[in-house]
Every structure is written in C-alpha cells, then in structure tokens.
Image: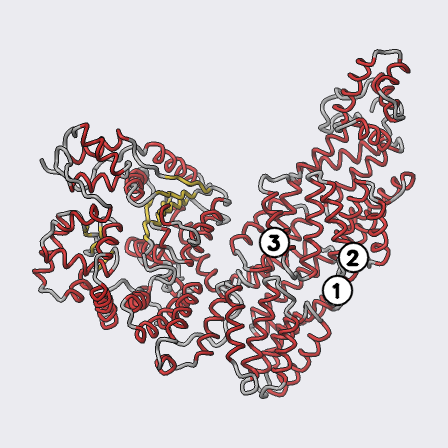
Amino acid sequence: MTIRAASSVLVGRQREIATLRDALGRAGRGEPATVLVGGEAGVGKTRLLEEFAVGATAGGARVLVGQCLELGEAGLPFAPFAAALRAVLRADGPEVFAGYEAEFARLLPELGRMPAGLAAPSVRPLTDAPRGYLFDLVAELFQRLADARPLLLIIEDLHWADRSTRDLIGFLVRAVRPGRLLLVCTYRTDELQRGHPLRPFLAELDRARGVERVELGRLDRDGTGAILADLLGGEPAPRAVDDIHDRTQGNPFFIEELAVAGSPLGCAALPETLRDLLLARVDRLPEPAQRVLRIAAAGGTRFAHGLLAEVAGLPEAELEDALRAAVAAQLVVADHDGDYEFRHALVREAVHDELLPGEHARLHARFAAAIETQPHLVVAGRAPAEIAHHWHAAHDHPRALVAARVAACAAADRYAYAEQRRLLERVLELWELVPDAADLLGMDHLALLEQTLDAAVTAGDFSRAITLTRAGLAEVDADAEPLRAARLLDQRGRLMALLGKSDGRRELDEAYHLAASGPFGVERVRLLADIAAHLVKIDPEQAARVAAEASTDAEALGEELLLLPTRIALLCHQQQGERLAELGRAETVAQAAGDTAALVLVKVLQSDVLCELGRYAESAQAAEAGLTEARRVGIGRSTGAYLLSNRAEALIALGRWDEAEKVCAEAARIDLSGVTGLHWLQLGAGLRLARAHPGADEMVDRALAFLGRPYLWPNHRLPLHELGIEAALAADDKIEAVRAARVAVADDSLPHLPREGWPVLSAGARTAARVGDGELAAAVAALAADLPTRHPAARAHAAQVSALLAADDEALPAWRAAVRAWRTDGQPYPLGRALLALAEAAAAAGERDEVSAAVTEAAEIARLLGATPLAETAATLARRVGLRGTGGGGAGADLLTSREREVLRLVAEGHSNSRIAERLFISPKTASVHVSRIIAKLDVTNRGEAAALAHRLGLLAEPAAGL
C-alpha cells in the first residue's frame, strides 16, 4: 500500500470555512473585515486558507499571499507585503503603482529605488511621517485593486512578524475606507508566550471594528480517521486510528507524519518524541540528501536554488538528486519561481536544531559570505537583513557588527524605524566584543548611541529613547562638546514631557546654558530654536528670550528662516486678534519660502485660534486646508495629526458628529506615542459618552489613565478632569463625580486657562447642583468670579454656571440667559442641555408653553446629533410634565391622575403611607400602590427623589388644560 505524505481532503473545518466566507461577503459589500486565524503548529492553518483561497478565486476574488520570515523582530521589514506586492507587479506591471514607483521601491527594490546610503541623518525629526505616507500609498493601492474585484490578502505566520509589518496591518485594519478587502492573518498560538510582541497587538486588533478571531482546534477521533483513510487509500484499522489519535491528540500534521512513519496497516513502531517524529522521514533519505537538507535548514524555511548551490558547493547533478529525493519524500516543495520551501516550518526547525555547534556557525557563515558576494541570490532588498542574520548566527562578531549597521540603514530606507532601532541596539551589544569597532564603523560609540536614539524617537519608542539619552549624557564630554550635550538634553526634556514624566524644564534649562556657551554657527541657531519651541508650553517668557537670542544669531548668519517654526509656535501666547494677524503674515512668509512644514504649523495654530474665537466652520476649513498640505509633503501623520484633532474639535462644536467620529478614527490609525495622541482620544471619548456608544467606557478609561502620569501639560489635564466628571455623572456615580470635581477645581492651572477652565467649572457646577454640595458650589463660584470670558463659548459657560448655582427663584431668568448665550456661540449640544435645564426651571415656575418649546427643541437637537442620553432625558422630562408628541410615551398615557397628584403632594410633605391613607380615607395598601406608580411614572428610585422632582418641576400644581 502506498501512503501519501499529505492529506488531500480538508476535514472538520466547515465552521471555519463558513466564517471566512461570511467575512469575504462582508468585505465584498465594503464593510471592514479582518479574520485572525490562530492555532498550534501543524493544526492546519495553511491548509484551511489554501482551500478557502481556491473558493474565493472561483468566486471572482483576487488573492494575494505574503509570509513573515523567521528572522525575528530585527528581520526584514514588511516581508509579507513585499511578497504580495511583488505578485501584483508581476501580474499588473509597474503602472499599477500609479506614478508612486519611487515610494513603493522601498518595498520592492526592483522598481528602481536608489541604494540606501550607510550614513543616517544627523538629526531625525520626532515623527515617522514618511512611513505613514508609505502606509497611505499601500492602503490606496489595495483599495484600487479591490475596486476592480474583492481582494483577499493573506498574511501567514504573524508570530514571526516584525513591528513594521504589524504596524502596517494595524493601519489597514483601521482604514477609514477599507474597500472590498478581506485581510486574513495566521499565527501560532503555542508561540505566544508571555512577553511576545504579538499578544498586545492581537488584543489591540480585537478592539477594532470588523475584526474576528478563528481558533483552529484539534480534530476529534473521526477527523483523525478521515485523514488516515485519505492517506492510506482505504479504511484504517480501528486500533490504528485509536493509537494515532491518542498520540497526536488530533493534530493534522502529526497525524500525517505518524501515518508515514509507521506501518501502512497498523502504524506500529511509532516514534517516541516529537523531534524523532519530525526527523523520521529525514532519516530515511540518502545521506547526500540529508546533508543538503541540513545546509538548507540554515538558510531558512524558503531558499533559492542558486543560493543553496553556492553554499553547498556540490556538483549540480548531485545537488539536484538530493533535492529530488527531498521533494519526493514531500519534505521540500518547489514553488513557481523555481525555489524551494520546507513543507512545514516544524521540519526545518527540527533539522536546524540537529546541527552541531561548529556546523551551525560554519553554515551560517557560508550563507552570509555567499549573499555578500552575490546579493542577487536572494530576493531584491533582502540581502542586508539576511547577511546580518547569518553573521550574527555564525557568532562572527566583527562581521555581525558591520552587517547589523548596514541592515539598520537599509531598514531606515524602508521607513522601518523599529527594526532600525533593534539592529542598532545589536550593534551596541556587539561593540564591547569588537576591539576595533570604531574603526570598522567609522564612528565613535556616542555617535552610535545618538543614531540609535534618533531611531527610537522616530519609531515612537519614547521610553527606550529616554534610556538612551541617559546613556549618551553619561558619555558625552559637555565641556568639550557643549552643543552635543545640549542636543541630548533637549531631546530628553521633550521626551520627559511627551511621556508625562515631568515638564522637562530642568533638562531644557541645562540645554540652553550649554547651547548659549557653544560655538557660534547654524547648529547653535537650530538648537536654540528647538529649545525655545519646547519651552513655549512651560515658560513663554523664557521661550521668547531664547528665541530672541537665536534670532540675533540667525540674522548674523543670514539664516532667518531657521527661526520661522519657532516664531510661529511663540504666537500661541499672544492675544487672539494679534495672533490671527501674525499667523496670516507667517503664512505668507512660509508660502513664499516654499516651507510647507511651517505652513502646516500655521494652519495648526490658525484652526486652534479660530475654534477658541467660536468661528468653528472657519476652524474646520483651516484644519482641512492644512491637512491637504501635510499629506502632500508626507507629514500628515506628524504635524498633520494635530490638524486632525483640531478639525474634530471644530466639527463637534458644529454638531457634525458623524464627520467628527470619522476624523477621530483617522487619528486613531496614526497611533501617536505618549501624550501626542491625547487630544483626539479625549475628544473621541467625550463624543462616545454623549452618544452612549458601547465602547465609551473603554475609551474614557484610556483617556483618564493619562491623569495617572506624573506630569501632563495643563491644556491636556483640564479637559481630562472635565471628562472624568461627565463620565461619573453619566454613570450616576455621585461620589466619584464629587471627587473628580473637587480635584478639578483645585487644579492650580485652572485660573490661568479660561478656554479649558470654563468647561471644567460647568461640569463642577452641574455636579454641585446634582448632589446639593454647597462647598463645591462655593468653590466653583469663587473661581468663576475671576475667570475671564473673552469669547462666546466662555461667556456661555459663565452663564450656565450662574444658572446651575442660582437660587430657585432666580433659576428661570438665569437659564434663559444661558440658552441665549449658547445660541450666540452656536454649539448645538450644550444648547440642548441648557434647553432641558430651562424646561425644568420653566416647569417649576408654571410656564408650560416655555416647557413645551424647550423640550421639543432639545429633543430635535438630540435626534440630529445622535445624542442618545440627551434624547432620553428629554423624553423623561416630557413624560414627567405630561407633554404630548415629544417622544414622552404617547398622548398623556403616563400623566399622573388627580388621585396620584394628591398622593404626591402628601409624599412631598413627608407623610408615610399610613398617614396618607388616613388623610385620603384609603387603605395603607392602596396608598402604597399609588406611591409605587408615581415612582415608576416619574422614573425615579424612591419617594424622596419623587418629592424633590415634584418641587423642581412644579408637579404639585393642577395641570393646565390642553398641555
């Protein structure tokens, strides 16, 4: 009997196939769709996707496949995407890249990219904007392909993925317009030990819309029998099924290996260990074939024929005979490019683990040498990472040092900054092992530290970057090189603030003193300008002094434009009218100089100032114009990110909440590090809270977690205080609302920041009114008395605070004033909330017509905004006061009867059920029933709340006819 080495049938995966087909259907309708397929090694993930891909292709979909390489976190960046794009290039030609061949060449060098230089930039900005631009281009390409027909993109072996690959996957998953794209990723669950970088990434993807997981389990006994029957060409003996199922626990790959390793009928003499099982078929090969397999295993799961021939050094005939034997044994398979791949990575791992230590080092060294002399033997662009990997595995420290540096430069050229940083960290580790490292690299150790620091900052690894600044400062000689030391201190100061560890003032002051004593020249001007820009939020006066000093130097050097970004940043502390005029002039200068980065910075501040002035539509337009410029020059993910949150803020104020949500989603895709992404997060959390979104609590918690950091810029901290108060009030957690409000009004920065302070005072006043906290009300009133009201929103908040704290007989005119102020400002949501408060005050005063108009308008605002809690509050109020036609529950169906009003009056007077029964000549049981009905109709929890509400809404008076 002939036994096939691999089963040709897919067993026991009907549910998983159905899930994948459903996902493809959703993708075909343009809905977000991502499936993460997990399972242990050998459980059949690849086999499942092969079957699914065949069906998808038959259904008209286009299928692209990419595989991650087992080179680790510092391996070849974007490897699976490069493979997928290479297939697109072969099928569609270079024109498919729509004129962006130069950018795509960073992933596909065959498109004609210029070779990467070995020298990294001396200063790298705090941004990975170029990488973000590349991500946008990749997403747009996939969207164009998916417009023609549904696109299935399969990424295999995600457990081996580098961070850049994971980042691009995350970017595609969160795409604002995903197109008809289904992304399917596989990973080994048994590889995800604690600390594996894929674990938090998967958890992050689980929160994204349209993502679902499929966990492949092992087969049951019947599944094991079905695979054996297919392999053997007939029914296996029951004992053989039982034995193999017990040994393999239903793992399909192990079933196949055991079936081949044992006898055809009984599968006797089974190997005892997994390693023996995986090597059993290898051991049956001729010795020359085994030797070639060992060589190939050092090269990786996939290997090119030409490279293997170069490393093996065998006559072509002998090599082909050996490979033919391995292919016949189905240990190796040939692909359409004429290269080879181990049938399963587990086999390659087992063979590689069998190498003797000397053999291991020797083979990896031969692979490295072969690729160095003939880089065309590997896929274009892959040589630097492969050479670095092999020299490192060969333990040849000098060559590994140089190769890692070259690979780091190549990674930076591909915008793979995380991989660049890891490779440079490897260079740092090897430095101590190589006596002449400085000569080999042509740089000193401090320069290497600085380069690693730049890569860490650009990759967003701010915590690691801070550690590197500490190491650099310990090594630099500040007396001999003051500007070098000042640059490190400047970076450290900004990083401390970005991570919320401190304001960075101490580091920036020290950096300034060193820079001021440094040699005159352009480098010092740039450094002083940077320090001034970083000081703006901490000490505007000192920032202005440092900028003036830099300006004097710049004028002497004829380099005035170096100061343009800093001068723009300093404008944020001028009066608004002056700021707009100066920003207009700065915009003209930036346009004339062709300085798009400065122009975008102008738009950031313009949109911010216009929003504070209450010119919300103009603010949104300015932010959108800035975003267009930012995207054009590839900084849409750095400075442009601030424009996104500014635009979202303006759209929220305008009541264009659906648009604002999309902008927040776009900002979320950028995934900024530290506090730089806090603004959009706080806005998005507030928006979700106002809409009672199912994910509101999670986003609110993420935003409020920033308050646990040792330091936050006040303009970030105060809005978080407001958010915390509003979240507690929404949850009816009065204790937490009071605690959060007390903390907020005690913030030292509140009296100095009216824009951020007034919303906090509004939230604090609302809390004081809700719980009857006189002490809190007094604290809010004291702060409100001195806080400036320069702009419409501030004046509206001030009127609102006055209304919330007003005595009962002053509430109605106070709320009328607050509503007028919000109408002037133009924000619909706070207007809606004020209208409901006005309705309550009018109800208490017996102004029934005013109640009806205010509730009706508030309900319409809530409907247009999709503000569910506001709509529910309007409906509840309408029901309580007996309004018809406002969503309050039918034409008077929930109005209190005259008897219930009598009972409510006595409840409000503090009478018990027994006393009510005596007064009304009814039984205590009947009185209890009336009280229960009143509580239900008024939507309160007890008789005390019912009494308070009756007084507040004037429910104790007789209703007017027709209301």
Q: Which residue is mark 3?
A: 680
Residue 249 percent coordinates (x, y): 28, 36
Residue 125 percent coordinates (x, y): 52, 70
Residue at the spot 84% in from the left edge and 31% down from the top edge: 948
Q: Where on the picture, by quarter, is residue 311? A: bottom left
Q: Is residue 755 visible?
A: yes
As drawn, 122 above or below 722: below
Q: Which residue is mark 1?
A: 576
For badge 3, the amino acid type reads Trp
Residue at the spot 41% in from the left edge and 76% down from the top edge: 119
For badge 2, the amino acid type reads His
Q: Earlier in the sequence, mark 3 or mark 2?
A: 3
Q: 159 or 268: nearer the eye?
A: 268
The quadrant of the image that shows the C terminus is: top right
Q: Is residue 230 left or right of residue 963?
A: left
Q: Which mark is residue 614?
A: none
Q: Which residue is mark 2?
A: 791
- Asked if the residue at tag 1 contacts the one at tag 2, i.e. Cβ–Cβ closer than 8 Å, the answer is yes
For badge 1, the amino acid type reads Gln
Q: Secondary structure at mark 1?
A: helix
As drawn, 798 above or below 905: below
Q: Earlier in the sequence, mark 2 or mark 1?
A: 1
As drawn, 89 above or below 595: above
Q: 803 or 232: nearer the eye?
A: 232
- Asked if the residue at tag 2 contacts the one at tag 3, i.e. Cβ–Cβ closer than 8 Å, the answer is no
Residue placed furthest toward the left: 317
